[in-house]
Image (cartoon, rainbow, N blue to C red):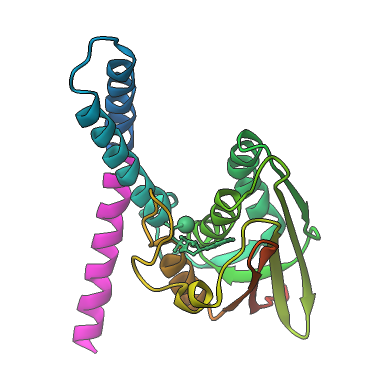
Amino acid sequence: FNNELQRSEKMEIISELAASVAHEVRNPLQVTRGFLQLMTEQEDNKNKGYVRIALEELDRASGIITDFLTFAKPEFDHIISLNISDEFDHIEGILVPMANLEGGKITTDIPPNIYIRGNSSKFKQAFINIIKNSIEAFQGGQGQIDIWAYSQDGKVKVHVRDNGEGMSEEALSRLGEPYFSNKIKGTGLGMMVTFRIVEAMNGQISFTSTKGVGTEAVVSFPEFVK
Ligand code: ADP
Ligand code: MG
């Protein structure tokens, strides 16, 4: 029991540290990126190749922060009742601009008073990682993501469906494996983090996907009736 306590105290310290590192590191990364970008635009730059690699590696570092730590907060294990419609308002605030930038759309249909028990930061991190993958799977300028939720038989179910590039059987079976990524700038950490969060919240997650047609994620949690 003592060991358990010590371990959870250590986890607490680690997540607190991670949260502050993530926030502190973001700004200097952005500044550095800006200057490197300026350097690539200089005409007689004989180090262009190096600068390009430096930019790619900076983007990789940002990707790790996004997949792992966007919502890492010191009160990491703070469990409250979450109104999922409020949570999705925040998520939309972040991802709708990103989807629009990529020429796509997000529509949501989330009833106003459905509750689950969980940690707000973790919940948002889990869905940001799923929806960000949908945005990154857009093909051409007609990307569409539909998000809808409902309660059914004591469970709250959230669907996220996209019309993106889809996945092969192999990719589908490897989803959630650490460092599995098909992207040049991928971290391969997003789904691992999402799967762990959903599990920690006593939820379940499943994916169906058809190559060239799209992907649908279904996440369910025990409903909390107020
Ligand atoms: P990353 O996004 O950094 O590659 P993830 O763990 O988030 O890592 O996803 C792993 C891989 O699963 C992605 O590289 C991609 O090939 C595939 N994937 C996940 N979600 C989708 C999706 N909605 N559409 C197509 N492929 C997806
Ligand atoms: Mg991802």
Residue 181 within the segment the image draws in magenta:
no
Q: Is residue 128 left or right of residue 190?
A: right
Q: In this picture, is 30 found above or below 226?
A: above
The residue at 24%/89% (across/down) is: 1
Relative to 88, 25 lies left or right = left
What residue do we see at 27% from left, 68% from top?
Answer: 11
Q: Nearer the viewer, residue 18 or 5?
A: 18
Q: Is residue 19 magenta?
A: yes
The kind of secondary structure the magenta stretch mainly shows is helix
Which of the pair 40/160 is nearer the observer?
A: 40
Residue 205 placement: quadrant: bottom right
Q: Residue extending furthest bottom?
A: 1
Counting from the top left corner in percent of width and height, residue 96 is at: 65, 41
Q: Which residue is pictured at 31% across the width and 39% down the height? A: 56
28 in relation to 40, above or below: below
The reply, left or right, for residue 184 in relation to residue 157 is: left
**Which of the two residues, 187 or 72, is positioned nearer the viewer here?**
187
Residue 218, horizontal then vertical, whole percent: 66, 73
Residue 73 is at least partly visible in this image = no
Q: Quadrant of the C terminus?
A: bottom right
Residue drawn at point x = 23 percent, y = 77 percent: 7
Magenta stretch bounds: 1-23
Q: Position of residue 175 (x, y in %)?
A: 47, 72
